[in-house]
Image: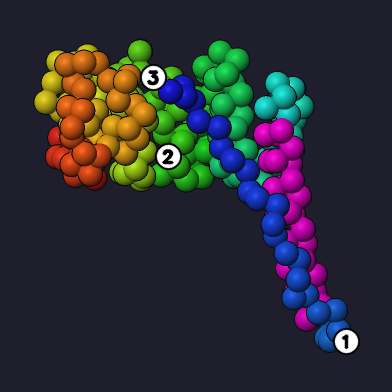
Amino acid sequence: MRSIWMAVGAALTLVVGGLVWAVMTHAGQATDRAAADGVNSEIRTDALLESGLLHFRHRDLPQAKAAFEHVLALDPENKLAWYNLGVLAQDQGRGSDAHQAYDAALKADSAYTSALFNKALLLKASDPDKALGLLRRAVAADPKASTAHFHIGEILARKGREDEARNAYHRAVGLDPALRSQVPAAFRPASGESAEAAVNSETEAGSPR
């Protein structure tokens, strides 16, 4: 099971069409130029995000970091760039830097599931209650986030809240049957239980569906 999530940058399929450079008033030209600049900036940002992801996959981490920081120079509130800087820091064991980057991503989008999930993993050992709160926010934003449900189950099981843990584990398996083998035997759904039944089972108390 993946320990952290890496964001996928914007796809480079934007079309810069529809801009008609005809004779028009200066005001109209200024408006269209501003629109064109905005589209070009978005394309450049997407290209930098993709470049950073490519460098990350090839383990060229300094170049990946530089690409994401370049995005932030163009768009200081870009949640993907902040998030990916958090992944880089978490990957390198720089927990404090990862926290700051995830917080910046969540400032831009408080329901950003991946940032909520990864920040929860950072806190899971040291502050399980806070991690649980973040994971519940993650599944509220994305009820199909199977791995988040799985980690909710782990935290609740360690707290001795067995019924709630079992429901969280069952929901995780219902969403992703591949997780079944990683669920502790005491909480594992019966082999004959359908995925639909697990998904529709009551979720852990206090966690929105």
Which element carries disc 2, helix, strand or loop?
A: helix
Q: 14 and 187: which one is in front?
A: 187
Is 104 left or right of 61, judged from the image as shown? left
Instruction: Specify the amino acid type for callout 3.
Output: Leu
Q: Which residues are magenta?
A: 27-54
Instruction: Specify the amino acid type for callout 2.
Output: Thr
Above/below status of 189 relative to 26: above
User: Quick one: which residue is furthest to the left in this view?
Assistant: 163
Alpha carbons under labels 3 and 2: distance apart: 15 Å
Please name the residue that numbered disc 1 is placed on.
23
Q: Image quarter for residue 92?
A: top right
Q: Magenta stretch: residue 46 in it?
A: yes
Disc nearer the start of the sequence (1/3): 1
Which element carries disc 3, helix, strand or loop?
A: helix
Rendered location of residue 12, percent (x, y):
70, 52
Can the viewer see residue 129 in this picture?
A: no
Rendered location of residue 135, percent (x, y):
33, 32
Q: Give the quadrant of the N terminus.
A: top left
Is 42 left or right of 170, judged from the image as shown? right
Which residue sits at x=24%, y=16%?
184
Magenta stretch, main secondary structure, is helix
Please name the residue that numbered disc 3 is placed on.
123
